[in-house]
Image (cartoon, rainbow, N blue to C red):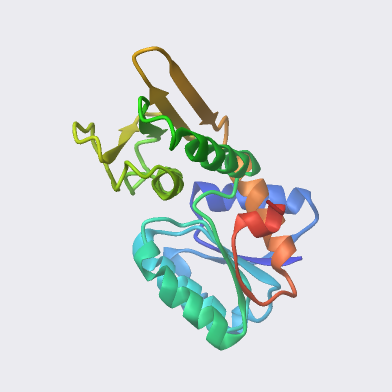
Amino acid sequence: MKIALIGYGKMGKTIEHLAKTKGHDIVLIIDKDNLQDFTKENLQKVDVAIEFSQPESAFENIKKCLEAKVPVITGTTGWLDKLSEARQICEQTGSAMIQATNFSIGVNIFFALNHYLAKMMNAQPQYEVKIEEIHHTQKLDKPSGTAISLAKDILNEIERKTNWVNHENSNPEELAIISKRIDPAPGTHEVTYQSEIDTIKINHEAHSREGFALGAIAAAAWIVGKRGFFTMQDVLGF
């Protein structure tokens, strides 16, 4: 598989290393210092693009890949207000795209557990729910995209909650997301349901970036030859 890396930060470097160990070729790397190489001609030399850049540049990066008819895997968060527009471009160009707030297989299992637990807890109003997420201090967006995905699933299932807020809350209709930035911290997410009688918690703690990178590589291999917009649930089959 011939891969273009769009964004060459810590995640891009981890993907590069692991992809090479699996026999894939990194034929194009785009970072802020060589944007002149980010051309349709260069993109068309690859089978798939993996995009982990910055929120302010992600949409344009994805658009370039789609317009070149190169499947793109994107894990950048903080730009998702333009996701519906990206989906439209994907459909119009006949290309393919996978967007995920987190590519880790373990996190996607955690998403499924969170959704199932929220469905059960809708009938248990004695429990108050909150989310806590911890990341390294270089993470730009707050709350994390993963925390927002967890919150959306909770809000879809628990009728007594109407919206999420990024602070401790006293309004029972609000779902609190508590964000902490501490070094070193690849990423921890915890969902807590607390009542006067007991506490229920589910937790995912990343030990390194490798889980995210391996999931992105697996998604890239899966999407080659496909058309349309997909998620990690499509890739994993649940």
Residue 208 quadrant: top right
Q: Nearer the viewer, residue 124 or 42?
A: 124
Residue 150 on image: x %, y %: 45, 43
> Residue at 42% of width from left, 30% of height from top?
124
Residue 165 on image: x %, y %: 26, 43
Q: Nearer the viewer, residue 159 or 199?
A: 159
Residue 108 quadrant: top right
Reply above or below: 116 against 196. below
Residue 160 on image: x %, y %: 32, 41
Q: Could one spot residue 35 in this view of the protein?
A: no
> Residue at 42% of width from left, 14% of height from top?
198
Residue 17 located left or right of residue 23: left
- Tell me how many marks there are: 0
Q: Nearer the viewer, residue 75 or 169?
A: 169
Identity of the residue furthest to the top in this view:
197
Identity of the residue furthest to the right in this view:
23
Reply above or below: 68 against 23. below
> Residue at 79% of width from left, 51% of height from top?
22
Residue 17 located left or right of residue 131: right
Q: Could one spot residue 158 in this view of the protein?
A: yes
Quarter occupied by the N terminus? bottom right
Residue 193 on image: x %, y %: 41, 26
Identity of the residue furthest to the front in this view:
123
Residue 91 located left or right of residue 59: right
Residue 112 quadrant: top right
Residue 97 located left or right of residue 81: right
